[in-house]
Amino acid sequence: MNAYVMIGAANGHIKDNWGNSDNKTAFAYGAGIQLNPVENIAVNASYEHTSFSTDADSDVKAGT
């Protein structure tokens, strides 16, 4: 079993049906574990998060 943490940057692009679009870059982080039950097979469980602030009133968030 291996445990890991991740930190870095995330970039997101959004475009609506009216031709508006925006790009955002944000801080991203995560952690997880990886199991190798047999050779060449890996099972991964992880959590990753980033938050793209679009303006003062709303956020677009992504996380798993």
Image (cartoon, grey):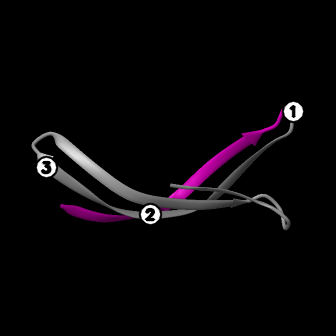
Which circle, 3 or 2, is nearer the viewer? Answer: 3
Describe the element under mark 3 as helix, strand or loop: strand
Q: Position of residue 34 (x, y in %)?
A: 25, 56
- Which residues make up the magenta segment? 1-17
The answer for how far apart the CA atoms under marks 2 and 1 are is: 33 Å
44, 29: nearer the viewer: 44
Mark 1: few, some, or many residues within 10 Å (few <14, many ≥20)? few
Please give the residue where the numbered disc 1 appears in the rendered image. 19
Compared with 5, 36 (above or below) is above
Describe the element under mark 1 as helix, strand or loop: loop
Residue 51 image label: none
Residue 30 image label: 2
The answer for how far apart the CA atoms under marks 3 and 1 are is: 48 Å
Q: Position of residue 10 (x, y in %)?
A: 57, 54
Q: Position of residue 39 (x, y in %)?
A: 10, 42
Report the residue at 50% width, 55% height from top: 64
Please give the residue where the numbered disc 3 appears in the rendered image. 37
- Kind of residue at disc 2: Gly
Compared with 58, 42 (above or below) is above
**Dominant secondary structure, magenta:** strand
The answer for how far apart the CA atoms under marks 3 and 2 are is: 23 Å
Task: Mark 3 or mark 1: name the one nearer the start of the chain.
Answer: 1
- Kind of residue at disc 3: Pro
Position of the N terminus, as image quadrant, is bottom left
Report the residue at 84% width, 67% height from top: 56
- Kind of residue at disc 1: Gly
Task: Mark 2 or mark 1: name the one nearer the start of the chain.
Answer: 1
